Image (cartoon, rainbow, N blue to C red):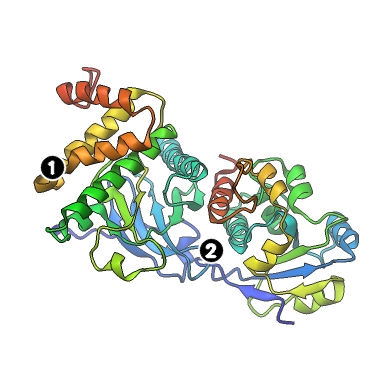
């Protein structure tokens, strides 16, 4: 229950979002199929947690998607697909869905929902439809499931030098969020 | 700062128009207004630099210039972040509305630190000057010039989590360069020499009593930047003739 968290981003009081992380998801293929079919009960951004370095990375994508939506300049179908797209450092929409969106094989999934009003909640709907273990969405939980090698490849971060730890730190997060912000320029 | 004409800050762009998050105007330049606020989370302090539309410019030109300048600044910051130079990271931006949100840099400016220092602590000042030179050297080493190096565009960020020494007016801390509004990416010796020359002149007029310490800045610069020799040689030329190389304009 406590695993679905409602967040209001600074400067966006009218667009609260709900975030949740599910581990060991069994029905990723089903969830992805709902998105492909455009099932209106499944208006979510389902993200593959292995390419997420931190909560801030997710929030930065949400901020951009919501503000672009407010300014009527979405590049993709809706605000939820835009969140997936905005994680990408480049402009290829199909590629961004493949890299950052849920895949049939995804086992750790972050669900993001932009709420239409503050009283809405998708906690029950997610609980019924996502077959996985809900865990609090913390930087630590993301760190456990992230794939540093893929993150490095996608965001073109330098390979670790000898003696350096392969794990990505705060500097990498800063650079990743910067790359996302500059995308499309 | 004793101006009596009261000007209201310009209208904010979407989404900040409907924001319920506090936005505090910190300072204003010719091009932009700088606000302190939070970004991404309510506990992440951020600097929001907004370039409002300039009504005296043709709208098409205005959009193009704003876009170019927002992006130039953000690209330089991103490049520095990638190369490990200490600068505020970009948290978000919109070139259409003309704003950049950057990480907030804690601490005070080098200018304030130098002015408010314990005058007896000459070693501390010497160390600070070296670190200033080091910061500029690392910036130049990655192919970036700042364009407006002054001691108020350098922050002295306390190291560790708010140690007792840092806030008591000491000169310890990490140098973080800020305000890349005039920065550029360059490989030319001339540009780097001019960058140093601007700092030298600004330093001399802001801190006349400490002017003799500028040699320490150059020492720090040499340690941090391999190609410093050529730049310093060129600095001699620039000192003789001033900042402008061409005689036009």
Q: Please, is residue A161 above or below residue B47 in the view?
A: above
For the C terminus of chain B, which image quadrant?
Answer: top left
Left or right of B129: which side holds A181? right
Q: Where is residue A71 in the image (x, y as percent from the top left)?
A: 56, 54
Residue A172: x, y in percent? 57, 51
Left or right of B24? Residue A148 is right
Q: Which of B32 and A19 is in front in this view?
A: A19
What residue would you read off at disc 1?
B211
The chain ID associated with circle 2 is B
Give coordinates of residue A162: x percent, y percent: 61, 42
> In the structure shown, which secondary structural element does the residue marked by tag 2 occupy?
loop
User: Can you name the residue that lies furthest to the bottom here?
Assistant: A1
Which of these two is toward me, B159 or A78?
Answer: B159
C-alpha distance separating marks 1 and 2: 42 Å
Q: Mark 1 lies on which chain?
A: B
Of labels 1 and 2, the one closer to you = 1
Q: In the image, is A2 to the left or to the right of A16?
A: right
Find numbered disc 1 in the image and state the secondary structure of the residue it sits on: helix
Tell which residue pokes out farthest to the left in this image: B209
Q: Nearer the viewer, residue B243 or A114?
A: B243
User: Which image quadrant for residue B163?
Assistant: bottom left
Q: What residue did someone put label 2 on? A: B40
Q: Which residue is drawn at 73% across and 46% down?
A: A96
> Label 1 neighbourhood size at 10 Å, few (<14), some (14-19), many (20+)?
some
């Amino acid at each position: 229950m406590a695993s679905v968290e409602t967040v209001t981003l600074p400067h966006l009081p009218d667009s609260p979002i709900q975030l949740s992380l599910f581990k060991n998801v069994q029905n990723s293929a089903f969830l992805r199929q709902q998105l492909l079919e455009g099932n209106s009960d499944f208006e979510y951004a389902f993200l593959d947690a292995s390419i997420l370095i931190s909560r801030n990375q997710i929030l930065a994508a949400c901020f951009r998607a919501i503000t672009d939506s407010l300014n009527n300049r979405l590049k993709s179908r809706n605000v939820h697909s835009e969140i997936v797209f905005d994680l990408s450092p480049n402009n290829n929409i199909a590629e961004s869905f493949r890299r950052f969106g849920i895949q049939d094989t995804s086992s750790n999934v972050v669900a993001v929902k932009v709420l239409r009003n503050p009283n809405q909640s998708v906690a029950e709907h997610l609980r019924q439809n996502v077959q996985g273990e809900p865990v609090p969405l913390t930087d630590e939980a993301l760190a456990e499931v992230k794939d540093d090698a893929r993150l490095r490849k996608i965001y073109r971060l330098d390979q670790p030098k000898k003696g350096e730890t392969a794990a990505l730190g705060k500097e990498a997060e800063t650079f990743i969020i910067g790359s996302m912000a500059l995308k499309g320029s | 700062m004793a101006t009596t004409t009261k000007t209201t800050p310009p209208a904010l762009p979407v989404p900040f128009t409907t924001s319920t998050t506090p936005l505090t105007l910190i300072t204003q330049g010719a091009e932009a207004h700088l606000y302190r606020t939070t970004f991404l989370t309510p506990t992440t302090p951020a600097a929001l630099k907004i370039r409002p539309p300039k009504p005296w410019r043709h709208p098409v030109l205005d959009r193009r210039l704003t876009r170019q300048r927002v992006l130039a600044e953000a690209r330089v910051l991103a490049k520095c972040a990638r190369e490990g130079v200490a600068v505020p990271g970009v948290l978000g931006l919109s070139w259409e509305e003309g704003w950049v949100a950057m990480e907030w840099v804690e601490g005070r400016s080098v200018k304030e630190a130098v002015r408010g220092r314990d005058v007896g602590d000459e070693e501390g000042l010497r160390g600070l000057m070296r670190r200033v030179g080091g910061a500029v050297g690392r910036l130049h080493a990655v192919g970036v010039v700042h364009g407006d190096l002054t001691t108020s565009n350098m922050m002295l960020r306390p190291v560790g989590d708010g140690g007792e020494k840092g806030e008591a007016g000491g000169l310890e801390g990490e140098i973080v360069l800020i305000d890349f509004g005039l920065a550029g990416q360059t490989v030319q010796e001339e540009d780097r020499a001019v960058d140093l020359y601007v700092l030298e002149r600004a330093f001399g007029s802001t801190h006349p009593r400490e002017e003799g310490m500028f040699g320490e800045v150059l020492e720090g610069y040499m340690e941090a930047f391999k190609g410093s020799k050529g730049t310093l040689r060129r600095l001699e030329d620039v000192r003789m003739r001033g900042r402008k190389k061409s005689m036009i304009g």
